[in-house]
Image (spheres, rainbow, N blue to C red):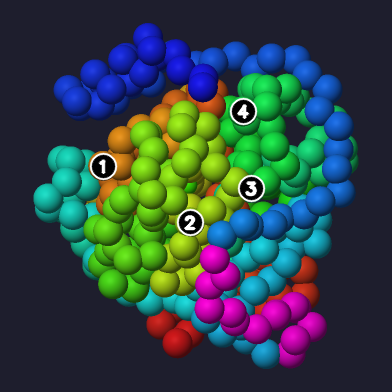
Amino acid sequence: MKRDMVLLGVVLVSAIVGVVVLLVGRPARPSGGGPTPSGQEGTGQTPKQGGVWTPRSGHAPKAGDEYTNPTDGSVLVWIPGGDFVMGSREGEADEGPPSRSHVQGFWMGKYEVTNAQYKRFLKAVPYRTPGYWDEPEYNKDDQPVVAIIYSEAMAYLKWAKLRFPAEAEWEYVAAGGKQFEYPTATGKISHDLANCAGTGGRDVWDGVPAPVGSFPANPFGIYDLAGNAWEWTSSIYKEYPYSATDGRENPDPRGTMRVMRGGCWHFSSGFCRTTYRRRIASHLRYDYVGIRVAVSEAEIEGGRPAAPEGGEE
Ligand SMILES: [Ca+2]
């Protein structure tokens, strides 16, 4: 069990008083993790299957269709666009005011990016290894890659020809089309539904990340939005209402506070709430922060241009 109680104390106190400044990063340790050819394999229940889609399918993807990104092996699920209410009046002050938001259809990673995938990246692009890369609690192929800073995650995404989900995209999927309070299979939270701090039920991972896909998928067929690795988004932390065009989607990683979503194995389940926003400085490295991928159809080589706004569904 990897617990830095001082760090945990600092972080929890920060959360409680609302001074959410994550001051203490953990440095990466040098290592020489070898590459493996394995792709992305979940170990949990199989969700409802869509079809297999490729840019050569000759038709628009449908909800639940799966596309496998050839570079990194990420399986992505087609999320049909739609409207939803982003934010909440009942959570922290920065979760409101709630506002109606539109999300274009896009592809979202079915699982968190795994260590096996990150090994493929490191084999292709010599790069700094993540923190804890040599430690068996963290470095199994089917665990999510963690302890990477924002710019390292961006380097992975550039190589993979993918991107982060924006905060609005993440929350739209997390709500499950049903305004779920928690981004799980049922909208509730328990150790049968997510890997959060502590154990119980299906959650047998005490203080470590679980293999991706160890819990049931959400209604869109996406795993581990709640818990396991906390997930970087592309969005700079700013007040609501969310607007993709007000500068918060500027990709320059320098000196920014980004939003991460979904809670993690290291924190209690309340942090997994669908609308909970966690700000994190882009240079910080934590052993509970990982990568969720996304891509628009138009960003895939051979994919179709984006549908005009409002004319998609
Ligand atoms: Ca997660």
Image disc number at residue 215: 2
In the image, taking residue 199 as reference, residue 211 lies left or right, namely right
Q: Amino acid at mark 3?
A: Val
Q: Farthest residue toward the front?
A: 201
Can you identify the residue that label 4 sits on?
137
Looking at the image, tell me whether mark 2 or mark 3 is earlier in sequence order: 3
In the image, taking residue 191 as reference, residue 110 lies left or right, namely right
Q: Position of residue 204 (x, y in %)?
A: 47, 41
In the image, residue 53 lies in the stretch drawn in magenta: yes
Which of the two discs, 2 and 3, sits closer to the camera? 2
Q: Residue at x 33, y 20 (%)?
A: 11
Segment colored magenta: 45-58
**What separation in Å lies between label 2 and label 3 (alpha carbons)?**
16 Å
Q: Residue at x 67, y 46 (%)?
A: 142
Q: Amino acid at mark 4?
A: Glu
Image disc number at residue 235: none
Which of the two discs, 3 and 4, sits closer to the camera? 4
